[in-house]
Amino acid sequence: MRRQLLTATVTTLVTALPGVGVGLLWQAISPSIRYVVVDGRPILADPESQSLISTDGRFAILTALGGLLCGMVAYLAAGRGTDIAIVTGLALGGIVATVLAWRVGHQIGLDAFQHAVHGARDGVFVTGVADLRATGVLVFWPLVAVGVFGLSETMDMAGRHRADRGPELAPGDGGEPGGGKPDQVGGDELDLQATPTGGNEDGREG
């Protein structure tokens, strides 16, 4: 139990920490979104802008890649009997990593944005910060991480099972080669010795 708890804790931390870097990268590559100040509040300058969708899409791609990398590393580092602990750590760590990426990326420049909005006159345009609107993508990191680990483990187990069974026999192959077996009827000839007509087995007439 102690080993399981330690494995789950380490896996959670290792999976969660990259969320900070992903959040910084997401903020850096997110497109600029313009707002117009109306009655002291920021309103989207172009409600039909594709920038919002692009921001969510880039977050989804980055978090999915993070889950893919974590799942592969966890599979390579996994020990025997720790599968459940690693899956638990990947799920919990993936959730924490996604939330960290979202909050870190959103907080960068947020104070400056709010200050600009409060001090601006109506009709003034200001540039917003990265924000996530399709919150369903928050599950991408843990789902991909657990899925990659589970798929890798399944393929590994299948490979070991085939290796334990040995080479498969071809159709019609009864096993080890060798003639003269009375129960072998799949060949081209029956390897049986017939007694000559009118004589015994020594070839002498009776």
Image (tube, rainbow, N blue to C red):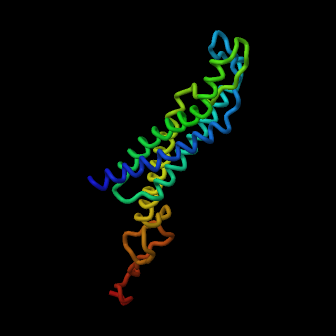
Query: Residue at 52% across / 37% down in the picture?
Result: 140
Q: In the shown orientation, is residue 121 left or right of residue 137?
A: right
Query: Residue at 45% across / 72% down in the picture?
Result: 190
| In the image, residue 187 above or below residue 76 | below
Looking at the rendered image, the quarter that the C terminus falls into is bottom left
Residue 47 visible in the current orientation: no
| In the image, residue 205 above or below residue 78 | below
Extreme front residue here?
119
Extreme left residue here?
1
Residue 153 screen position, x and y as percent: 44, 53
Residue 109 screen position, x and y as percent: 62, 32
Where residue 53 sits, quadrant-wise, is top right
| In the image, residue 129 above or below residue 73 | above
Query: Residue at 49% across / 46% down in the picture?
Result: 17
Q: Nearer the viewer, residue 95 or 86?
A: 95
Q: In the shown orientation, is residue 29 left or right of residue 67?
A: right
Query: Residue at 54% across / 43% down in the picture?
Result: 20
- What number of labels is visible? 0
Residue 145 screen position, x and y as percent: 49, 45
Residue 140 visible in the current orientation: yes
Q: Nearer the viewer, residue 189 or 56?
A: 56
Residue 167 screen position, x and y as percent: 47, 66
Q: Nearer the viewer, residue 87 or 41?
A: 41
